[in-house]
């Protein structure tokens, strides 16, 4: 496993951990409510727990899709060439900044 794959796995693990912590907190609230009153209505907390579980799956899918898109863009040499040309054009367009810098260096 290369550095990129390790970084991606760590990011996915962090998403899981954050969601699992939220689910743990919601479950603790639900259990505390039931401990105080066994007939308590926990439907709102149950809905939040279910929503968080579903959201986790969506966040993981979105992150995996993002990594796939980044990998596809990075593997296309044309993207690198276009990016380099845009950077070159941007630097060349800043003639005023380069002129000011030159005058400051000479007369500064």
Image: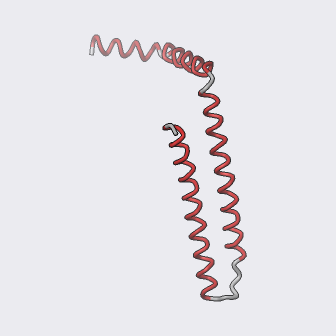
Tell how many labels. Answer: 0
Q: Is residue 50 shown above or below 66?
A: below
Asked whether, in this view, residue 96 is left or right of residue 19, the answer is left
Q: Where's residue 78, x and y in %?
A: 62, 18
Closer-to-camera residue (6/90): 6
Residue most toward the left?
108
43 left or right of 6? right
Quarter of the figure with residue 22? bottom right
x and y percent of residue 94 in the render?
Answer: 48, 16
In this view, 51 is above or below 90: below
Residue ID at (48%, 17%): 91
Residue 24 position, x and y percent, is 57, 69
- Seen in the picture, residue 40 relative to 79 is either above or below; the reply is below
Q: How is the image coloured?
A: secondary structure
Which image quarter holds the C terminus? top left
Q: Looking at the picture, how far across and down is residue 28, in whole percent?
A: 58, 75
- Say whether residue 97 is left or right of residue 55: left
Residue positioned 52% across, 37% down in the render: 4
* Picture residue at 61% right of the left edge, 26% below the top: 75
Q: Nearer the viewer, residue 94 or 66?
A: 66
- Which residue lies at the image location 65% right of the left edge and 51% below the top edge? 59
For the residue pair 71 and 82, the one nearer the viewer reads as 71
Quadrant hosting residue 25: bottom right
């Amino acid at each position: 496993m290369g550095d990129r794959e390790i970084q991606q796995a760590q990011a996915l693990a962090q998403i899981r951990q954050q969601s699992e912590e939220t689910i743990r907190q919601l479950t603790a609230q639900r259990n505390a409510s039931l401990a105080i009153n066994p007939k308590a209505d926990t439907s709102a907390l149950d809905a939040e727990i279910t929503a968080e579980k579903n959201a986790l799956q969506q966040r993981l899918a979105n992150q995996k899709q993002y990594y796939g898109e980044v990998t596809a863009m990075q593997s296309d040499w044309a993207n690198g060439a276009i990016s380099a040309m845009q950077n070159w054009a941007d630097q060349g367009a800043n003639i005023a900044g380069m002129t000011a810098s030159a005058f400051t260096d000479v007369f500064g």
